Amino acid sequence: MAEARSERTRVRRHPERADYDRATIERILDEALICHVAWTDDEGRARVLPTIQARVGDTLYLHGSRAARAWKAVAAGAEVCVVATIVDALVLARSAFGHSMNYRSVVLYGRAREVTEPDELLTAARAITHHVLPGREDEARMPTPEEYKQTILFAIPIEEASAKVRTGGSPDNEADMASAVWAGLLPLATVAGAPEPAPDLAEGIPVPDYVRHPRRP
């Protein structure tokens, strides 16, 4: 069984939910649509921003806007903490205290480097487009040099990371078992609605299969 890569990635609260297996970590990073990136800026202030991530092998790419001042500290080499979370179900207990959620999450620590090499910029752009909607990377035009200047892309090695997974039902105590309150799980899932064409879409362009039948990794 895999072990924690560092003391700060070791899960201490409910350690039985910890999963240090690399395959589990990668699956969660691939499936979670967005992540949150936290760091301390050069003035000592805590920062956290939601963004899009995409994994290519052992590297996690992050997308940001160059116009956002908050990313400057990350570009300068600040250590970051990346968190990706998927909520699978609401756990409804007979008591308010017993309520919970079934979830899968990853915490990743590291220092991000700015991606500047043209081939890697293209790799990251394609990966992020694929992460948003698999198949889109084969149709959408990739960024121009001018568009890259407005975007900032970071790469973080997936080295110091851990996953935490909760499954199962509500932990009701014996005194509450006779209560006439419904208890159980309410599963949750992200489901796409019907595609809505852009008002300026040219006639005769069909909805691609990957849009009509979208899938997450």
Image: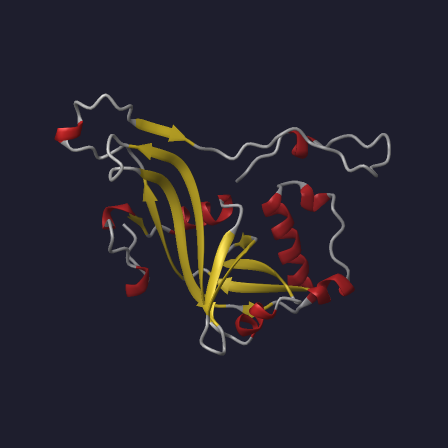
Q: Where is 53 relative to 69, above or below?
A: above
Picture colour scheme: secondary structure
Residue 107 lies left or right of residue 200; in this view the side is left
Question: Is residue 143 visible in this depiction of the protein?
Answer: yes
Image position, residue 153 (x, y; %):
61, 63
Residue 198 lies left or right of residue 130; in this view the side is right
Image position, residue 126 (x, y; %):
66, 52
Q: Quadrant of residue 165?
A: top left
Q: Where is 10 relative to 194, above or below?
A: below
Image position, residue 167 (x, y; %):
31, 37
Image position, residue 92 (x, y; %):
31, 32
- Which residue is most to the right? 203
Question: Foreground: 98 or 55?
Answer: 98
Q: Where is 71 relative to 163, above or below?
A: below
Q: Residue at horizontal 39%, vertical 44%?
A: 104
Q: Where is 182 relative to 114, above or below?
A: above
Q: Residue at horizontal 27%, vertical 32%?
A: 93
